[in-house]
Image (cartoon, rainbow, N blue to C red):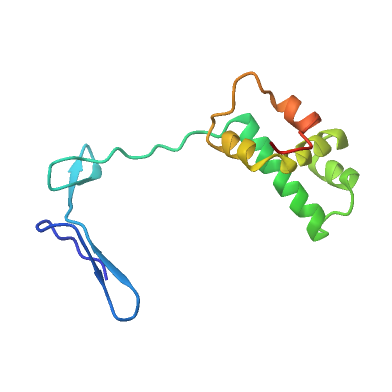
């Protein structure tokens, strides 16, 4: 059940079945045609605006999708996958190489904090074999 409570203090109420009820006093106000949540102290949250993915983020996602297609048997070879996608098989191989990157490098790619001097070509053509 969802209820909006404008008054009171924030608190957590545990129930006997292990569920938690969170009481957070908020108020929803319409500003410029948009609904905004206002906290009791008058503070409003800044809505998260999704950004367009970077080319390296798209390449990483493409590599994972293509690897999943190979592993599931949807396609049997990289050549078949490349033909189906309309790209060169060496490109498919390089994108699949991105799936072998260190979790720290992947996190940096997804958070868009990868240093500017590291390029997609460097990571895709010759991924580090040892995670440090």
Quarter of the image holding residue 128? top right
Nearer to me, 24 or 67? 24
Residue at image location 26% in from the left, 41% down from the top:
45
User: Can you say whether 23 is above or below 37 in the image?
Assistant: below
Residue at image location 19% in from the left, 44% down from the top:
30
Q: Is residue 22 left or right of residue 41?
A: right
Q: Is residue 89 left or right of residue 60?
A: right
- In x, y percent, where is residue 95? 76, 37
Name of the residue lying farthest toward the front: 132
Name of the residue lying farthest toward the bottom: 16
Name of the residue lying farthest toward the left: 7
Quadrant placement of the C terminus: top right
Quadrant placement of the N terminus: bottom left
User: Can you say whether 121 is above or below 79 in the image?
Assistant: above
- In x, y percent, where is residue 110? 57, 38
Total numbered circles: 0
Residue at image location 59% in from the left, 23% down from the top:
115
Nearer to me, 126 or 81? 126
Q: Is residue 6 left or right of residue 123?
A: left
Residue at image location 70% in from the left, 42% down from the top:
62
Name of the residue lying farthest toward the top: 117
- In x, y percent, where is residue 4? 18, 60
Quarter of the image holding residue 25? bottom left
Quarter of the image holding residue 92? top right
Nearer to me, 115 or 119? 115
- In x, y percent, where is residue 67? 77, 49
């Amino acid at each position: 059940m969802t209820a909006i409570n404008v008054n009171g203090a924030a608190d957590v109420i545990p129930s006997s079945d292990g569920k938690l009820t969170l009481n957070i006093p908020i108020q929803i106000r319409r500003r410029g045609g948009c609904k905004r949540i206002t906290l009791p102290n008058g503070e409003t949250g800044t809505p998260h605006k999704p950004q367009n993915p970077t080319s390296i983020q798209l390449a990483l996602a493409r590599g994972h999708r293509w690897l999943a297609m190979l592993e599931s048997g949807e396609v049997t070879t990289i050549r078949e996958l490349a033909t189906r996608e309309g790209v060169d098989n060496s490109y498919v191989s390089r994108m699949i190489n991105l799936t072998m990157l260190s979790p720290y490098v992947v996190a940096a790619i997804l958070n868009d904090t990868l240093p500017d001097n590291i390029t997609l070509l460097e990571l895709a053509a010759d991924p580090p074999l040892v995670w440090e």
